[in-house]
Image (cartoon, rainbow, N blue to C red):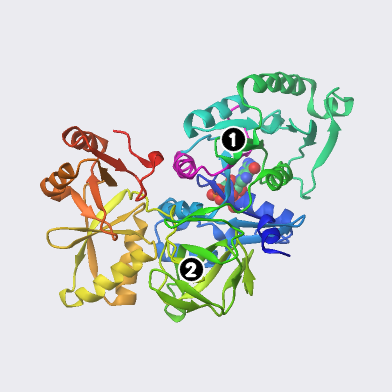
Amino acid sequence: MTLSEETARRRTFAIISHPDAGKTTLTEKLLLYGGAIQEAGAVRSNKIRKTATSDFLEIEKQRGISVATSVMTFEYNGIRVNILDTPGHKDFAEDTYRTLTAVDSVILVVDRVKGVEEQTRKLMEVCRMRNTPVMVFVNKMDREGIEGIELLEELEDELKISTCPFTWPIGTGNQFKGVYNLYKKSVQLFSPGKSTISEMILSSTDQNPAELEEFAGKENLRKLWEEISLTSELFEPFDYKRYRDGHLAPVFFGSALNNFGILELLETFLEIAPGPGSAEAHERTIQPDDKLFSGFIFKIHANLDPNHRDRIAFLRICSGRFEKNKLYYHPRLEKRMRFSSPTAFMANAKSSVDEAFPGDVIGLYDNGSLKIGDALTEGEVLNFKGIPSFSPEILKEVINMTPFKAKQLEKGVRQLTDEGLAQLFIQQPGNKKIIGTVGELQFDVIKYRLENEYGATCNFHALPFAKACWMTFKDKTQMENLLNRKASVIAFDKEDNPVFLAENDWMLRIIKETYPSVSFFKTSEFKPETEISV
Ligand code: G4P
């Protein structure tokens, strides 16, 4: 197969949701349909169990298991599907945000009982920033919950995306009888607890066949036709371009647990979801069928087990053909690197790969020279855009507890933050190190790893800030004034960009009034969508 044929047949996406909406269940069912696993339960291990939320070592053990499910690949009707796993635990949200930089589209799972939840909002914000095409799977239709039209309106209002139902539920909760496909004009009937994964397609239902009426009930069908006529007034019809541009989300209803509505979702996904697109670097736009190989690192997983202290860096291939044992160029370090055992992931099994193509994600064993955002090329200097740091929500100062180990501490903090475990900001005077994270758990991980891998002990001093905002200035004098006068709330990221440490939005507003030429951003990349309006 040629490079363009290989590229065109790849679909790389992530399934995202608020914890408990059904992401793991849906992932598993897609793998079952794809033949990548033979029995339910095989990917359950990628879920961090609720009982373990306060024990980070237990969580790490489970994350260790989940490395194998970081990318799950299967072939379906000639299409190579790469599902990128995202950690469900909210403390690892930044890991999820970064994974979203490596996908071409997402499936968002929403719990029909709970509707839009906190993580749903945050994840969609990241998707909007990147104009990622989104499909929505409304899960748990076997339970009572928010009605279809109301739920779609909630999605539109809260997630700021237009929706377009592809299927519509017939009855709900214990009266849930199936879904009507608005495009195929066909019905799939639902039998709770069905153990097979086949779904029944009944044929066209324009005339309410007696068989359907008998199964679904007269009242449910009446409601279905009524709601369908309303949906055409309330929601947009499907528009391919609007979906591809991330403005319109096709919506499917079903029940992952009961294997229902998944085939519809999968087949439509394969029909309309985009393949690998272009990638932006500061130097140029990279097209997937550019002959020369290029890719970037978006995630690093370090094994905490002292007997197997390895690191796997996850590389998304953007162009060309990646080959095992070939010498590639690492522009940041200006050196050549060879990878002798690149790894592909297949459900729970790891296997060595000889070659990989745009859209694929492979794992590279690394001893500490790769960091998040790094490029690998065939010699060209490329600095990929679109792998920003996101504003942390918890900020703490690192206090060194063993003064003669200051060097080890410094090295450890730099390396761990290069892995993307947390962010590092430096504040003057005194070279204070401030660690920023999305969750508390990372502080335990950092402390543990500094002690066990670098022999350095530290404590953390909580700071009153809830945000670190990157800044641009139209007026240089205002910038100098702000940096000088507000040094106690200014720090610098690892690339030496100033960030404003804010307790709340009110602080930002006050600063903006005094220094009107400043703009605040919630990511280290300055895009209009990431500007904070104050
Ligand atoms: P997550 O990865 O998004 O966190 O969610 P997960 O798939 O683990 O699902 C969360 C809970 O919701 C699980 O129950 C799961 O069985 C249930 N669930 C998933 N899909 C459906 C559905 O379509 N209908 C209903 N009624 N429930 C569904 P649990 O009791 O928390 O876990 P488990 O003991 O079943 O593993």
Disc number placed over residue 134 in the picture, else none: none
Marker count (numbered): 2
- Say left or right for 221 vs 533: right
Q: Earlier in the sequence, mark 2 or mark 1?
A: 1
As for residue 133 lying within the magenta part, the answer is: yes
Quadrant, the C terminus: top left
Q: In the image, is residue 208 above or below residue 385?
A: above
Q: Helix, strand, or loop for circle 2? A: strand
Residue 119 located left or right of residue 348: left
The residue singled out by tag 2 in the image is 376
Q: Which residue is drawn at 43% across and 54% down?
A: 385
| Above or below, comparing residue 382 to residue 341 in the picture | above
Q: Residue at x 78, y 50 (%)?
A: 196
The x and y percentages for residue 403 are 16, 74
Q: Do the residues under discs 2 and 1 have CB atoms within 8 angstroms?
A: no
Measured Cα–Cα span from mark 2 to mark 1: 32 Å
Q: Does any portion of residue 101 appear in the rendered image?
A: yes
Relative to 49, say whether 261 is above or below: above
Percent position of residue 318, x then y: 55, 60
Task: Please state the extent of the stretch shown in magenta in the rendering.
Answer: 118-147
Residue 62 visible? The answer is no
Residue shown at 26%/54% (left/top)?
497
